[in-house]
Amino acid sequence: MPVTSSPRSVEPRPPLESITLLTTFKCNIACKHCGYRSSPRRTEVIDLDMAKDAIRTAKEAGAGLVAFTGGEPFLFQPMLRELVQYAQSHGLPSAVVTNCFWATSPDKATAVLSALAEDGLVDFTTSFDWFHLEFLDVARIRNGLHAAVELGMRCHVNVVVTREGAVCKSDVCEMLELDPEWIGERGFIEVKELSPVPVGHAEDYVPDKDFLRYDERWLIGRPCYFALRNPVVSTTGDVYGCCGFGGGTDTGPSELLKIGSMRERPLDELIADLRGNLLFNMIASVGPNSLIEMVKERWPGTLTRGDYVFNCEACQEISRNPTLKKRIGQLLRELSEEARASDERDQL
């Protein structure tokens, strides 16, 4: 469904803000919500030279941050540190996403993060929810987060919630020993509740009734703030237009926004194709559910789920619903033709 000319209604394109590297799908734990089915049995690790090429190219393309995630990137600390150093040498600060298994004590957490902070790590994300607490002592999450706070990093705590989950955002301050002002509107720790997306382990283990979904009307006109702004490079070298799980696989994010592979084409060409793709621009500017609603207006009776785990599951609906996907392709071709006709009239 690639259409490369964009109508004026979705301009200007959002800036390229960052690039994310999926450094590995190996993880020391196997959370039941993980979209990639990461586990101790996985073996994939990103090629070091390819990762450096991605960092260098992203900087040249205007990215302001490189993020490292997985799997669990701290399982390969020497590689992580080399990549953080390499990013800093090219003027890019780094972010990391981790479950904090390595933060066995406050001193250990500070020692590990201090070295990375000197190398250019400025942004720290961890998770705090019943999925992770099934495997991890809360003290390790607390140690890692407190060390990041003390080092002045931007900090984020993701709380994955379900209708039957036992941990939620209101538990964060008490269990992680945080001052409530730290996570207030003007605080320096962002705490975000989110539902898992029914893909990967979540599709295997979480009952459908437990996902938190929104009525499709609520999602109309709500842009995706990750598409185009934060492309992702997988361990396979495949490049995706966002970090969302909707329609993802065990080796990468949303298949709907997959653009190609670094093993076959240079990343700068892939980024150019990504940013010139009409579908991706529409998702970034008005959100995937707006496209679904446009199809239902054009073809009444088009069958869709009707409620979604925010934008990600709406993208999953497009990728998994053959009729919907075909009609969106036709809709985008019509929009492109209208835009070209309008340009030609303006030039007369």
Image (cartoon, rainbow, N blue to C red):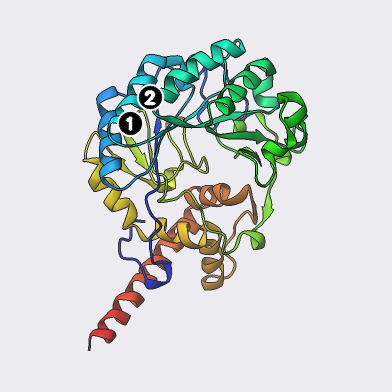
284 or 245: which is nearer to us?
284
Q: For the point 47% across and 53% down, which residue is it? A: 322
Residue placed furthest toward the bottom: 348
Q: CA distance from mark 1 to mark 2?
A: 7 Å
In the displayed structure, 206 sits above or below 257; it is above
> Is residue 275 left or right of 100 when viewed as pictured?
left
Picture quadrant where residue 119 is located: top left
Picture quadrant where residue 53 is located: top left
Q: Is residue 26 visible?
A: no
Secondary structure under the numbered disc 2 in the rendered image: helix
Q: Is residue 346 visible?
A: yes
Q: Amino acid at mark 2?
A: Asp
Mark 2 lies on residue:
119
Residue 311 position within the rendered picture, expressed as x and y whole percent measured from the top left: 56, 51
Q: For the point 47% across and 57% down, which residue is it? A: 283
Q: Amino acid at mark 1?
A: Gln
In the displayed structure, 154 sits above or below 343; it is above
Secondary structure under the numbered disc 1 in the rendered image: helix
Give the mark count: 2
Res. 294 mark: none
Res. 88 mark: 1
In the displayed structure, 71 sits above or below 302; it is above
Residue 255 position within the rendered picture, expressed as x and y whole percent measured from the top left: 43, 43
Q: For the point 26% across and 36% down, which residue is it? A: 56
Q: Quadrant of the C terminus?
A: bottom left
136 or 106: which is nearer to us?
106
Residue 36 position within the rendered picture, expressed as x and y whole percent measured from the top left: 50, 30
280 or 225: which is nearer to us?
225
CB contact under 8 Å: marks 1 and 2: yes
